[in-house]
Amino acid sequence: MRPLSQTLLKVCGATGLGDIEAAAAAGADCVGLWHGVPGGPSELALDGLAALVAAARPAGLLPVLVTFLADAGELAAIVRRTGVAWVQLHAYQPPAVVRALREALPAEVGLVKVLHVDEAGGCVERPLIGAYERAGTDLFLIDTATGDGRIGSTGAALDPGRLTALLPRLTRPFLLAGGLSAAGRPAYEDVVRHSGFRGIDVDTAARNRVTGRFGVPEIAALARAWRTGIPHTAAPAPAGGFPDHPRLELSR
């Protein structure tokens, strides 16, 4: 199974085996699987989640549970049943949930906490960043919160200039989300050069505009642009090692 890339590419919202196959063929590292996202367009029943986790691993993809759930016991049971590798807390779960989940899960299961940045650059979780880190967060994901309160796969772009005040507060690595595209990669050069940057999380730009499903050319273009800085559609750059954090070296 291939190692994780130096610049991680996570595509989010797979709902079928075709999405898993496209993500793997195009060079993605991780696939986000929604469960516990009420009304979400990519929401999976528990059996569907388990089936896609089982398909992702042999395809070389790290399966990530993306959830709004906040019950640590329920989440731990889902991890045990499905075998997901990471849990991405994508709502406003407090640090106490992260701590309880960290205590309930094996050390090799990664915990990702989303930080929501609004259009003015504010981040509601900013005062809690240190508490999230002490509670056991392995990786942050910085995403957009829209003016009307929507979070998660909104397609709303995150202004790179709004991150300058937030990034120095992080002592854990982070992924970037929020309306990212292959063509928009140059605008984030300063973010990509930050020592904590580990990759991107994309939903909308990973999809074929006609079918709405994950597309190999679209994902390959993202992989090339964000791993090489060249925003053209082509085969993704070869995967490299990812040695920076022990819990990010997870079995896949």
Image (cartoon, rainbow, N blue to C red):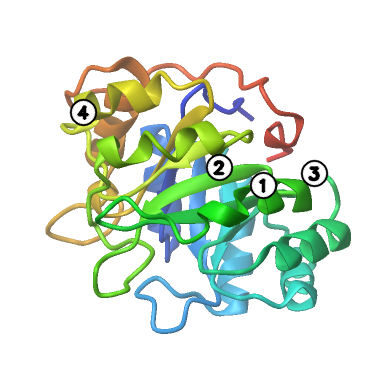
Real-space CA distance between mark 2 and mark 3, rounded to the nearest whole angstrom: 16 Å
- Direction from residue 125 to residue 186 in the image, left or right: left
Give amino acid for label 1.
Gly
Q: Which residue is mark 4?
A: 187
First-in-chain label (3 vs 4): 3
Location of residue 139 in the rendering, given as x and y in whole percent from the top left corner? 61, 42
Tag 3 or tag 2, which sits nearer the N-term?
2
On the rendered image, what quadrant is the N terminus found in? Answer: top right
The mark lying in front, picked from 3 and 4, is: 4
Q: Left or right of 227: which side holds 70?
A: right
Q: Nearer the viewer, mark 1 or mark 2?
A: 1
Relative to 20, is 150 above or below? below
Which of labels 2 and 4 is toward the front? 4
Residue at 79 percent across and 60 percent down: it is: 99
Binning the other alpha carbons within 10 Å of mark 1 as few (below 14), some (14 to 19) or many (20 upward) gives some
User: First in sequence: mark 1 or mark 2?
Assistant: 2
What amino acid type is highlighted by mark number 3? Glu
Amino acid residing under circle 2: Leu
Residue 55 visible? The answer is no
Q: Which residue is mark 1?
A: 130
* Crowd tier of the residue under label 3, counting other residues whose Cα lies within 10 Å: few below 14, some 14–19, many 20 or above: some
Residue furthest left as drawn: 210
Residue carrying label 2: 61
Q: Position of residue 43 (x, y in %)?
A: 45, 75
Q: Where is residue 130 drawn, in percent x and y?
A: 67, 47
* Residue type indicated by callout 4: Ala
- Do callouts 1 and 2 mark residues in contact (Cβ within 8 Å)? no
As measured in the structure, the alpha-carbon distance from the residue carrying label 4 to the one carrying label 1 is: 28 Å
